[in-house]
Every structure is written in structure tokens, then in C-alpha cells.
Amino acid sequence: MKQKQVDPDHNPWVENLFRPLVIGIMFGCVALSMVEMVRLFLPDPNLADVYTNAPSFKAEMMRLFLPGVNGTLIVLACVLAALEANYSYRLIRARSLRGSDLLRFRLIEIAIFFLLIKIGSYIGESWTGVLADVRSWPSHLYRIFDIETIAAFLLVLISWHVSTQTKRDFDRLQEPPVYHRYDVPPMDSLTGRFFWGGVILLIVTGLTRIGIAQVFNLRRPSVPGLVLNVLVYSLLGLVMLGQVRFATLRKRWKTGETKVAEELPRRWVRYSLSLIGLAALLAFLLPTGYTLGLLEVIGYILAVILAVLSLITTLLFWLILLPFAWLMSLLGVESAPAPNTQPLSPPALGDTGGDVGPGWLQIVRSLAFWVIAVGIVFYVVRSYVRDHPELFESLAALGLVRALRRLWAALWRWLNGWGATLKERMPRGWSVRLGRRGRLPKEPFGFFRLGALSPRAQVLYYYLSVLHRAARQGFPRRPAETPDEYRTTLGPHLPQSQEDMDQLTHAFIEARYSRRAIERDDARRVRSSWQQVKAALRTLRRNTEEDA
Amino acid sequence: MRRFVPFLLVLFAIAAFLRVDFFFTIAYLFFGVYLLSRLWARRMVERLEVNRQFVSRAFQGDRVPVDVTVRNTGWLPVPWLEMHEALPVQLITPPFHREVISLGSREQRRLGYTLNCRRRGYYPIGPLTMQTGDLLGISRRSAAQAGPSYLTVYPRVVPLHQLGLPTRSPLVALPAAAHLFEDPARVMGVRDYQPGDSPRRMHWTATASAGRLLVKQYQPAIARETLICLDMDQNNYERGQRYTATELAIVIAASIASHVVTRENLPVGLTTEARDPMLNDQVQFFLPPRSERAHLMSLLEVLARIQVASEMSFVELLRRTSVDLAWGGTLTVITGRESEALFDTLVYLRRAGFAVALILVQSGRPSAELRKRADLLNLPIHRVWREQDLEMWR
């Protein structure tokens, strides 16, 4: 028996069932939120019943504009419309319908939608009621176009249109990219539709949850709980993005006559689901709620730091005043009161109604939330700018950014210069020697004490100090110059101290490069040579200044 | 996907503005997908190992199977890996091998294709360019490249009679039974050791002194060496048939070398100036005469690689290289065009004590003037142009 081969690029189950169903469900998720939103605008159902049961004109109007919206019907209609859109698209393509034929087909399709929705709106009603309503149509035409039917019809039309466009974009994925030179590429069109749908869904759902009146109340509490339709929309959308990506790549590989491994489609699905599953797990583990806003958290942290500093300051003052208090007590004056060691509590935050601030757990939770949220935003923006260097360039070209960059560069140069000066003043040998033997003994208040250095470090300091002074007077040591070479360069300028310079150089070479122990006496001898050379340099400078 | 990041930021903004806790979960979901996709895509390429296996030397007409093994050494799977192996058009059509695979954790895949060695040459096999990316098109594609390996296809070696060449003197060395080329009693100096030199020739004292291997050079008594001088100057071959003529010249050189070493058991060398694709430069080759099989393969390898060059003087090359040839040796000169300067040089070489043979790779029959001139100079001249044979050998 001959086995039927399935073309991997045209899997009928995926194309005709899976994709339309997913698109339908996704739009159903959006429609569900929209229905909830519509319900927000309806008055109290009991009041509506009173009006709708009354036989007056006012009641007639209320019945028309305030119907009981059947959410299930609308969502189901949207899903079915998505499926139908896929079928009709294929039918039009297969029959090559154009012009008036196509228009006629579409009009009939739309009329059938309306009819089915109208029939669907009667579900649950008695036959007599339905017949009575139908009989009233000739005299009251507006009864055909009640709000429920119109709303459902509009949503179904949008669902149908979006599904048709999505199906068209999926087909366009199979076309060479050159076809889309003057058009929105199908990949962008599909992703854009998904993202816009997501944004609308979130806004509508959010407004439904918090209530329109509370939108601009920034101190309202957060809304907890799972929003299933948003979750379903997001998960299905991500799965679809994976499919779109696969279809795009598949097309490219097919054009390039690239051999594709058989197991690739299967693995693609498996890995996509794993990735989305892992991301979902991560998402559910991260904190979502916060009781304190970002500025409040920062303010609270600053308040805690200030409280601690204040406590320390109070304690210090108390300790300083304690001897005076003792002396005063000897003179019969009252002793100084003991300091209030209770830390200043940070200000109470939030609209909790009382003076009690938020609990530590809430603070920590809010802190964790904001750290994660700010970190995420920072990472996303940074990676986006890195991936789009042209964006970075255009940002950098802005006047304000240029000024800020110049300011930063100047500050950086100043810091670098300061660091270099510090490094220059520090004997180079220190880091090497001290690295082996441990850190320098800490100098109290940062004062430099030459005597506290080891004899070897002292010798190094003497020589490097001469180098520094000589460089300032216009005799710098070149980077490749050895100490002996430098001695012959500097020596002629210091005729009276040439011998001292020789001794200093020799001592430096020994201290820097030999393993021989350097004694205190050695350092002392070198110190006198150093002082002589320093004096000679001073004289040289004076002479130069006088000549000038 | 350009809009993913703006969408993500909008999600965070909406979540922060509306303060619906679950919206943050959704934002985290998208961020998780974004983060994992980026990290995954970045890590995948780093963990790939490629190994290309094939016989790196082949003769014309051989079929060489190539195995490319791609291994994922990491724990993270590689969902898709697009591979493009660039291949020489002379050996395979189309000149590339493309395949898309998927690698699981620590999985390896083997790809195979076969090269048809239709032409001699030195061919790069690869590089292998690999592209991969995430599953949703969020991050940029990562690419890696595995450098090329090289395949040497030796020129075809044919029996000399098939080329219409004599198989005995004076084309090759004197047919003396005694293998006396150099007099070991008359050392005239030392030179650097070269593969194939007998250990008996090693000058140990000089080696120890110089710190490198040196061998003795003896004064030649009589040489039975053959040096093939191959002209690769494109201007010395007929314009319309330059490719065919130079390829034929190389086949002739290879065949003579093989004949001298395998049939006559005599040393053969090669000198030529040509473009070497391995060095991507014009190079002067000089392989001193040796009779070992390994030496023959080295010689064939050079003949496999070389390509025509320009702006060179073949006559000058002849004069220069004859200095290194022992007295009494045979010079087999292969060129595409005779000239006054060439004849002058050949006469000079003959007078210097070398046996000289000229092989002209030209179409048509030898002219009467050329025959007369060869007789006058007592130079054996052979004209080779058997295009049908060359076609047959391909």
C-alpha cells in the first residue's frame, strides 16, 4: 500500500485547523474582555428588568440600549468567525474569485453572519417570545438592530477580518521577500497584529478590573488574581510567533534548496514549548505585587539611612560631652542626660489610614519587586540599544545628550588625571613588594609616614621622589631609559651632587632588583644622598629662574 | 523581531499604570522569553565543535568522500543550525553543501558529500559557515565559521609513450648500469640536510658546530640526474589554448618525473616559477633531484598546486637553476614557445656539460625550420599536443 506523503510546508491539520483555531481563541480572549467592558457600562440588571418589562416607549428604548449581553455567544461567534474566515479565504483562492463575484460572496457572507448572530441572540428564549419579536419587526425595525446584535456583529466582523488578514500573511510568508519590497513584510504584519492585540487586551482588561473611575487614582491598591484570557492570549501568541518564525526560515531554506533534517519540525515545537514553559515558570516565581511605589521605596531607604546616621551622630556627641558632664557634675551642675539611643523611625508611608507604617515584609517585597522591575527595564533597553547601534548614534546626536556626554568626559578626564597624579606620587615598587608581603600598615587619617616604611620601600621612595622632582624641572626619565642611563643624563646637570646621584641610583637598583636584605643603616645613608640631590635640584631650579 | 522590546516596555508601563498584578506576570513571561532566547542563542554557537574528515590527497579521477561531524558539546540543545560549506566548483556542483540540522544536548551529527576530483589543483574545502538563532526570532542570528581544510589533487600521470616521448636517453639520464653519481672521496662542501638524504652523507662535525643538520656535498663524477624545468609563464603559451597547454605541460612534467623515478630508479628534480595558491604568491620552486618515492610525491604535490604566472623570465630561471645541478645531468625543458633567447640558453647549457631536451607544448606539426635548427644544435626537440589524449585523461 502506497503511503501518502505529507508536504511539511503544507500540513493541512496545521493550516486548516490549528492556526485558525488558535487565531480564533486569541481573538475570543480579546472579545471576552471587550464584553466585560461593555457590561461595565450597563446599569443595575434589576433596574433594567423593571424598564424592560414596562410597556411604555421609555421602556422600549431601555430595552433597546440596555440589553443583557450574552458573553458566551459573542466569544463563540468570534471563534467560529475566525474558522470561517480561513475557509472562505481558501475558497476564494481556489475559485479565483475577483471583482463583483468576490463582492457578492463577501456580502452574502456578512449577511449570513448577521443572521446567525440574530438567531443566536434568541437562544434560551421561548418560541412565543421569539415569534412575537419577529412579528414586531415590520412595525419596529430598530428591534432587528439591538445593541447586543450590533456589538456581537461588530466583534465578529473584526475577528473575521483579522483572521483573514492573518491567513493572508501566513500565505505571504511563502512568497519571496522581493514581493514585499513596497509592502509591510508578513512577519512584521503578524507580529504587529499580535502585539497590538495584546496591548488592547491588557488595557481593556485592566480598565475592566480597576473600573473606569479609578483610572487616574494613582494610590489605588493593586488588583490581585489570575487573568486567564490574557494568559491564554499570551501563551498562544508566543506559540504562534514560534510557528511564524519557523515558516519564515523554512521558506528561506526551501528557496536556497537547503536540505532540512526530518526531525526539525518536531523538535521546533518541543523546544518552543519548553522555552515558553520555562519563561512562564520564571514569570510565576517573580514578585508582582507591591505596596510601596518606587519613589516611596527610595524614600524609605533614605529615611532608614538618615535615621542610622542620626543615631551615630547623637552617640558621638554624647561621648564627647560625657567628660564635660562629669566635670560639671563635680561643680554641682546637673549631669548631661543620656542620649536617646532609639533610632529615629522612618516616616510612616502609604495611605494606611493610621500612623503605622508598612511592615518589613511589605517593604522587602516592594524592594524586591522594584529591583527586579528596574533591572529588567534596564537590561531590555541596554540590549536593545546594543542591537541597534543606529539608534544609539541618533540619540548621541541630540544636543542634550551631547552636552551630557561632554560633561561626563570632562569629569572622567579629571578623575583619571587625579588618579594618575596619585599613582605617580606613589613609588612604583610598592605595589610589587607589598603585593608579596601583604598590605601596608594602615595610616591613621591617611597621613604618610616615611619612617613607617620598610628600609627597602624607603630607598625606592627616595629615588622615585628624585625622578619626580627632576621631571618637573624638565629632566624626565624616558620610558626605555634604565636607571644607569638616566644617571648619566641627569648627572651633568648636578655636578656638585653627581656622587650622591650615583649612590642613590645604585641603592635603588639594589633595592628594586636584588634579594639582599636592606638594612636601616643603608636606608639612612641613602637618605643623606637623597637630601643632597634634592638640594642640588633646588639650586638648579633657582638658577634657572634667575636666568629667566 | 523589531517590535518585541517596545512591546515589552509597553507591557511594563501598562502593568505599572493599571496596577494589575497579573500583568506583571505577563510582562515577566515575555521578558523571560526574551532573556532566555538571547542567552540561549549566544551560548549555542560557543558549544559547537566541527570536525571535517577526508583524504587530503587524491589523484585525478578519484572520488573523495567528505565527512563533516558537528557536535554540540553543551547541555543546551541547538534547535536549528544552518550550515553552508563552500566547495570548489571544479570538484562539485553546486559548489556548496547546505543543510539544516537540529542538535540535542551533547548530540553530534554527521554530514556527508563526495567530491569528484576532475581537475588537479589545491582546493580549499570550506569554510563551513554556521548560523543559528532563537526560536522566535527575537535575538540576532549567531554565526560561526570553521576554517577550510585543503585537498590536493595530483595531476594525471600517463605513460610516456602516450605522450609521444622517448623513454630512453637523452631525455632521461645516461643508461649506465653503475649508480655512481658523486665521488665520496671528493668532498666539495656541505649543505643543509633535506629529506631523502642518506644518513651516510651526514657531516656530524659540521652539524654539531652549526647546530643544524648538514650533509656533505661531493664533487660529481658523472650525473644521472634529471631536472625538469617547467615554464609556467602564461605568455609563453598560445593565447587561445593557454589553459589546455599549461595543463598538458604539467601532465608531461608529472609523467616524466614518475617515469624516471619508478621505471628508471633515477633521481629527478623540478624547477619552475609559478603562482602557489597555498601561499597566494608567485613562488620559485626548486626541488633538487632525488629518487625516492616520497620525493616524487612532493614533486607531484607542487605540480598539483601550481598555477600560471606572469612577469617572469623562464630563460633566466633556467640559467639560475642549472648552477645547482650536478655536471652531466639532464635538463628537460618544457615550454609552450621557442625563442632565440631560449635556444641560446639551451646551447649554453649543453656546452656547460648538461644533456638538454626540449619539449614544446604546441599545436600543429614541428616546422621544418625548427627541425633544421634542432639538428644543427644537436638538441632533441619533442612537440606534444594530443588534445584528444588530454580529453581522454580527464
Image (cartoon, coloured by chain):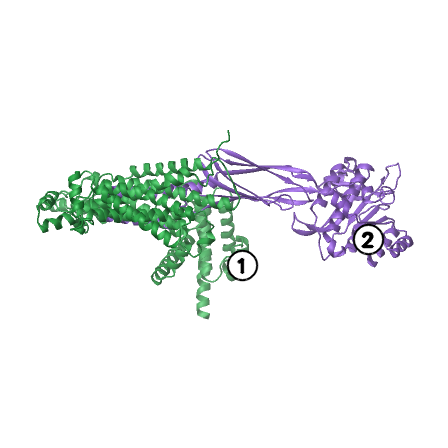
Report the front residue among B282 and A134: A134
Chain letter, green: A
Q: Quadrant of residue A53?
A: top left
Q: Are marks 2 and 1 in contact (CB under 8 Å)?
A: no
Kind of residue indicated by mark 2: Gly
Compared with A539, B76 (above or below) is: above
Disc 1 sits on a residue from what chain? Answer: A
Other-residue count near label 2 (Cα within 10 Å), few / some / many at <14 / 14–19 / ≥20: few
- Taking the view exactly as shown, the residue that stands out farthest to the bottom is A548
The residue tagged 2 is B364
Instruction: Give the mark toward the camera: 2 or 1.
Output: 2
Q: Is residue A543 visible?
A: yes
x and y percent of residue A373 in the render?
Answer: 29, 45
x and y percent of residue B243 in the render?
Answer: 72, 51
x and y percent of residue A432 in the render?
Answer: 45, 45
Chain letter, purple: B
The residue tagged 1 is A489
